[in-house]
């Protein structure tokens, strides 16, 4: 019973680290498949992040969303693209991400307009998941695009100013900065006036994201792509 209680308490943390390892592993796989695969992988991460952000979980005792691993995974992919291909390829990937996000948003809202059959049992679930408020939708897409652009430029700055450091160190610094910007902008754009304390949300969310960044960069440093 004692072991079962420990397992129940640590279940989210176990899943969190498993998910982190999966994202890093697939990032390396996409990198080895080439530029096209890596670009597509970045876009998929962006779509997953904007869908999974709806689920709230308890992680390390804090209430957070279930999307942070994928947000940072997408930016890690951008850093891979910039490190091993070019800044232009990374910049193009951000607009490809935005293109797919915009397309998914439009078709998902059209999907909800279909009148369900009397025998349908899924419409309520689709409605619950896809019926985002316009404010959250605009905030999520806009902030994601801004953060991707900032990450590309800041990573390029680190490449020029810290040429002797490893990719893992530069990626870690870049992700830490970009995730603070992401957390700050989205909290104010999407949550201000909705939650009791935006600053508490920023601190807690950023703390969890720093854990993700540390895990990612540690894995990258060990694997040495």
Image (cartoon, rainbow, N blue to C red):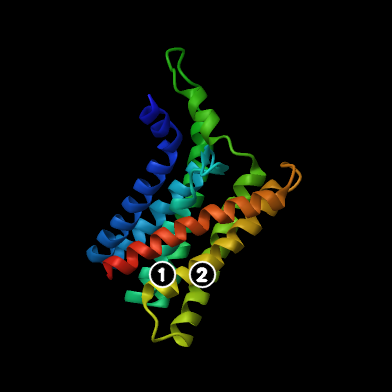
Residue projecting furthest to the left? 33
Rendered location of residue 120, percent (x, y): 43, 17
CB contact under 8 Å: marks 2 and 1: yes
Q: Position of residue 122 (x, y in %)?
A: 44, 22
- Estimate how packed mark 2 is, as few (under 14), some (14 to 19) or many (20 or more) residues with alpha carbons within 10 Å: many
Up the image or down, 174 lies above or below 114; here it is below
Q: What residue is pinned by disc 1?
A: 79
In percent of width and height, residue 153 lies at: 52, 76
* 194 relative to 40, above or below: above
Of residues 210 and 141, the one drawn nearer to the viewer in this rendering: 210
Q: Farthest residue in the front direction?
A: 2
| Side of 90 where 59 appears, left or right | right
The label on residue 35 is none
Q: Nearer the viewer, residue 155 or 114?
A: 155
> Residue drawn 41% across and 66% down?
78
Mark 1 packing: few (<14 Cα in 10 Å), some, or many (20+)?
A: many
Q: Residue 205: give x, y in percent of width and height.
A: 58, 51
**Does residue 113 appear in the picture of this structure?**
no
Quarter holding the N terminus? top left
- Identify the residue position indicated by label 2 in the image: 151
Residue at screen point 37% across, 64% down:
218
- Describe the element under mark 1 as helix, strand or loop: helix
Residue depicted at 43% across the width and 43% down the height: 13
Disc 2 secondary structure class: helix
Nearer the N terminus, badge 2 or badge 1? 1
Considering the image in quadrants, where does the C terminus appear? Answer: bottom left
């Amino acid at each position: 019973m004692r072991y079962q209680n420990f397992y129940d308490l640590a279940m989210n943390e176990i899943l969190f680290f498993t998910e982190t390892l999966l994202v890093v592993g697939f990032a390396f796989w996409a990198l080895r498949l080439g530029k096209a695969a890596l670009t597509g992988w970045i876009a998929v991460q962006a779509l997953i992040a904007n869908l999974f952000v709806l689920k709230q979980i308890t992680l390390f005792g804090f209430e957070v969303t279930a999307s942070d691993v994928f947000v940072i995974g997408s930016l890690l992919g951008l850093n891979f693209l910039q490190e091993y291909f070019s800044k232009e390829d990374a910049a193009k990937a951000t607009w490809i991400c935005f293109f797919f996000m915009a397309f998914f948003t439009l078709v998902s809202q059209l999907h909800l307009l279909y009148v369900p059959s009397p025998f349908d049992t899924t419409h309520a679930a689709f409605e619950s998941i896809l019926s985002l408020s316009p404010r959250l939708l605009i905030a999520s897409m806009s902030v994601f695009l801004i953060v991707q652009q900032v990450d590309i430029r800041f990573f390029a700055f680190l490449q020029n100013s810290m040429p002797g450091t490893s990719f893992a160190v530069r990626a870690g610094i870049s992700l830490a900065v970009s995730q603070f910007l992401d957390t700050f902008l989205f909290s104010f754009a999407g949550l201000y006036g909705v939650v009791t304390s935006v600053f508490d949300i920023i601190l807690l969310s950023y703390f969890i994201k720093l854990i993700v960044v540390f895990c990612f960069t540690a894995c990258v440093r060990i694997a040495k792509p």
